[in-house]
Image (tube, rainbow, N blue to C red):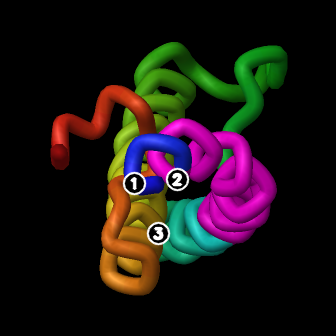
Amino acid sequence: MGKKKKQKLPLAYKPVGFVLGWAGGALAGMAFQKTWKLIRHEDDAPDALDPDRGWGEILLAAAIQGALFAAVRSVVDRSGAKAIERSTGVWPTQAGGRD
């Protein structure tokens, strides 16, 4: 029975992972807006196509945004997987290596 549960759980985890990913993206977006406001004292970060912004400003915003999104996604994914493992005893991915 344990093997069957391990094979079906990744599929069952997909909707949970989707919701967690969406929530994590929203959280990362808010964190980026607050971070940008602290750094540059502006409400809006530069857009790559904004002709009034320089390369340095655009690349700084992109680097900060990318780092925050990656960090938040890792926290959300890992926390979700740990919660599934605690509640079911099974790591939610086939490649989880938690046999």
Q: Main secondary structure of the magenta part?
A: helix
Choose between 5 and 63: the one closer to the eye: 5
- Residue 82 x %, y %: 32, 71
- Residue 70 x %, y %: 41, 43
Q: What residue would you read off at disc 3?
A: 80
Report the magenta residues as a range: 5-26
Discs 3/1, front: 1
Q: Residues within 10 Å of mark 1 (few under 14, many from 20)?
A: few
Amino acid type shown at disc 1: Gly
Amino acid type shown at disc 3: Gly
Q: What residue would you read off at disc 2?
A: 5
Q: Quadrant of the C terminus?
A: top left
Could you say whether the residue bearing mark 2 is in a helix, strand or loop?
Answer: helix
- Residue 2, numbered circle: 1
Q: Residue at x 63, y 44 (%)?
A: 8
- Residue 56 x %, y %: 42, 22
